[in-house]
Image: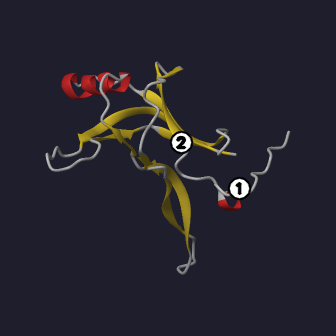
Amino acid sequence: MAFPLPTLSVDSPLGMPLAHRFAVFFFVAGVIPNPLDIRFQRVSGLSTRVETEPMKQGGKNLITKQLPKRLTYENLVLERGFIVGSPLNIQLNDVMNEFKFFRSDVLVTLFSEAAVPISAWMFKEAFPVRWATADLNAQDDRILIDTLELCYSRMLTVRL
């Protein structure tokens, strides 16, 4: 079965997806998605790099080949408005107050304008390594932002 090609629309020039239709799913116990902690303002760190190792070719001083060595990943950084009483906050409290770590899979999904998933990134065995709340300032009239940084063992990419 072939996948349909994206249609042209005013909302999406040339059928290209827009970056603001996404959700983040934390899987509790590796199976059940947490339905309360899916909305984030910003996601960054969706990148993979291939480390290489130079190999000199025997007898040829001018040629050095690069061999793939391993994949490396940036940390996943999630930003959202300050939320009270979410399951993710409970897990973060355990990490920051009790030094108890619970690894969970995190799925970032990009949606089309028809709310159909068109791309996804699965972060395996993720756990928080940084949690920050924006500065409190009595002169600012804006939403308080939390930043959560996760490291993980592997990123799986699914692009349709």
Q: CA distance from mark 2 to mark 1?
A: 19 Å
Query: In the image, is 4 to the left or to the right of 104?
Result: right
Q: Residue furthest left?
A: 138
Residue behind mark 1: 9
Q: What residue appears at the point 68 percent right and 41 percent down from the top-left corner?
A: 114
Asked which secondary structure carries label 2, the reply is: strand
Q: What residue appears at the point 65 percent right and 45 percent down from the top-left corner?
A: 112
Instruction: Tell me, yes or no, whether the two marked residues, 2 and 1, touch with CB atoms within 8 Å.
Output: no
Q: Is residue 29 above or below residue 61?
A: above
* Residue 157: x %, y % from top left: 59, 44
Q: Residue furthest right?
A: 1
> For residue 41, which quarter of the picture?
top left
Residue behind mark 2: 22
What amino acid type should be assigned to the residue bearing mark 1? Answer: Ser
* Residue 11: x %, y % from top left: 64, 55
* Residue 13: x %, y % from top left: 66, 61
**Label located before the other in sequence (2 or 1):** 1
Q: Crowding near pointer 2: few (<14 within 10 Å), some, many (20+)?
A: many
Asked which secondary structure carries label 1, the reply is: loop
